[in-house]
Image (spheres, rainbow, N blue to C red):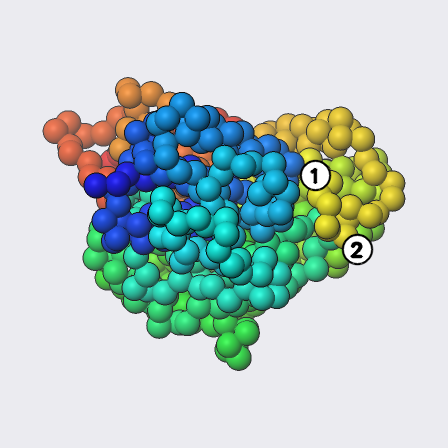
Amino acid sequence: MKKVGFVSLGCPKNLVDSEVMMGTLEQAGWEITNNAAEADTVVVNTCGFIESAKQESIDAILEATSLKSEGKAKRVVVAGCLVERYRDDLMKELPDVDAFIGTNEVTRILEAADATKKFRELPLLPIGNKTATYLYDFDTPRHRATESHTAFIKIAEGCDRPCAFCSIPSMRGSFRSRRFGSIIEEARNLAKQGVKEVVLIAQDSSRYGEDLGEVDALAALIRALGEIDELEWVRVMYAYPTHISDAFLAAIAETPKAVKYLDMPLQHASRNLLKLMKRGGTRESLEKLIKRVREKVPGITIRTTFITGFPGETEEDFEELMAFVRNCRFDNLGVFPYSDEEGTPAYDLPDKVDPKVAKQRRNRLMKEQAKISKKLNKAKIGNTYKVLFEGLSQESDLLFQGRMEGQAQEIDGYILINDMPDDFDPQIGAVYDVRITEAHEYDLIGAIV
């Protein structure tokens, strides 16, 4: 049996593509191995979003080709977003790579992995952009790489937003939604496999269904998924701030299985910067939005992300962002220094910010958020929450871990469990009541009650 090893980099959306490629190969008789050194074919599914991700992808490709030069792997395939951005350059610079497939060519993985095919000589699909049409379906083969109790469902692909810093539209193509029934059927299949939490992902989840002529389709999808008996949680990631409708918020508030959690990247709060980023809005309009979300969904956890050092960001702009964060008191927050990416509108903007300054601002903002997070977490001490049990902690074999509704896996913090009733046998994927006993900046300590 031929063996294939995968290195999947970047976001959960890329991970789903890897799972589909693995499932396609597995269905065709390949064995999936976690040890690339023993694989006949190594597939590197790359990220090309920002400079650090691109470098990580290049390093992984070079590591894979070194296995080939050592005689361990017979074939190396490079897939994903980096291929969409730099296919011609990669083909010239990496002669030891046997095949390159873009994000719209996931279904060609069998050809790409086949050692009898001279894939470099085969016709190529046009790279990304407006020509992309690929969407997987509920019956598409898939080998899940996530924990047994949680799974991602990609509800749409591509993006039409004009954000000045972002290269995703050129890599993933125009926004296109999957059919409603396909998503529901996939969720049912996953639930039958023991999945307790489904996480809905897309480049822009809040626009789901618009291109199909549907109104408030995401709200309807949440309600329908909430009717699947075996599921415990339904989570939505990557919602765009201008598309947070009252119907969407009502679906979260009124659907018991919909986690009270909103992942909504805001990127900045200064009117000047939001305009340069082609995002629109002002600090005042965003504060009104945050207030509306919290009124419509009491107790909701809000996560967001910001960029520091975007071209034209002054110290005054950054201080406005700091004040915005202090005022809104987000539960979870990520900050990224600006990455100057060729092919994006921001690449041609003047008034570049020194990367050192961008990183300093990032660190200042995260330090401020750490204070906020710790205060919010301390307020949870003594309270009891529903927690999805996940087994042994990543930090120590002496602790267990789980997540409450407001914690997305591998993005936010965890509940570290150090106590439970005698002779209690907790099951991974089950939901238990956990009383919080200690609080840190991002993680909480608690006991199963």
**Where residue 107 sits in the image (x, y, percent)?**
40, 58
The residue lying toward the viewer, choosing from 132 and 221, is 132
Q: Secondary structure at mark 1?
A: loop
* Residue 417: quarter of image: top left
**Where residue 59 sits in the image (x, y, percent)?**
53, 29
N-terminal of the pair, mark 2 or mark 1, is: 2
Q: Let me know if residue 254 appears in the view.
A: no
| Depicted 50 relative to depicted 192: above or below | above
Which residue is pictured at 73% across the width and 40% down the height?
340
Query: In the image, 114: left or right of 63?
Result: left
Crowd band around label 2 with a 10 angstrom C-alpha radius: few (<14), some (14–19), many (20+): some
Which residue is pictured at 84% across the width and 43% down the height?
312
Query: In the image, 365: left or right of 319?
Result: left
Q: How far is the residue under mark 2 from the one under mark 1?
A: 18 Å
**Where residue 124 sits in the image (x, y, percent)?**
53, 58
Crowd band around label 1 with a 10 angstrom C-alpha radius: few (<14), some (14–19), many (20+): many
Tag 1 residue = 339
| Depicted 354 relative to depicted 430: above or below | above
Q: Which mark is residue 275?
A: 2
